[in-house]
Amino acid sequence: MKWHLLQIFILTFLLLSCKNKLDTPSSKMALQAHVEQLKPDVEALVKNWDGYWALERNIAMIENTNPLNAIEFMDKLANNCNAMIMQMPQELKRPEIKEQIKRVDTRINEFYSEVNRSEIRERVVENHIETIINAFDTLNKKLNRVL
């Protein structure tokens, strides 16, 4: 009986003393990124820019997933970025805004061409996604500042 209690005590001690490794960087379930929100007056100017809003939704979804799952968004990112470029409202066609849109497009094209769909290195995908998110964040900052 004492032996049985000792085994239960040791097992309980081992289970409770194990460190929880779920907070390690490699086990993050979602990317930690921030994209500046558009000001209300700027949002009103871009309300009919469907490509922009589709790309924003893609980025929001990617922010809430595991980086390797973001590979599934490659085609959507590329298509929505192309739509954003093609559908750009006339009042937004300013050099500084076009430059930021080109930067977003470049980052998405790099992701599309450099990451294989069977990529298993999470950090490789995460680096590309972070550069896309940062480029989109910079676009929003530029829109807020210029308009």
Image (cartoon, rainbow, N blue to C red):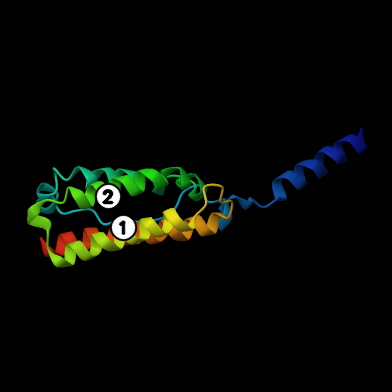
User: Split into 4 quadrants, where in the image is the C terminus?
Assistant: bottom left
Q: Where is residue 77 in the image (x, y as percent from the top left)?
A: 35, 48
Q: Position of residue 80 (x, y in %)?
A: 29, 46
Which quadrant of the view contains residue 4?
top right
- Kindly report the distance in space between the C-alpha atoms of the residues bearing marks 2 and 1: 8 Å
Q: Where is residue 71 in the image (x, y as percent from the top left)?
A: 47, 47
The relative height of residue 57 versus residue 37 in the rendered view (above or below) is: above
Q: Name the residue under label 1.
A: 105
Q: Name the residue under label 2.
A: 82
Tag 1: amino acid: Asp
Regarding residue 72, the answer to whether it shows in the image is: yes
**Badge 2 density bin: few <14, some 14–19, many ≥20, Cα 10 Å:** some
Secondary structure under badge 1?
helix
Proximity of marks 2 and 1: CB atoms separated by less than 8 Å = yes
Regarding residue 59, the answer to whether it shows in the image is: no
Secondary structure under badge 2?
helix
User: Split into 4 quadrants, where in the image is the N terminus?
Assistant: top right
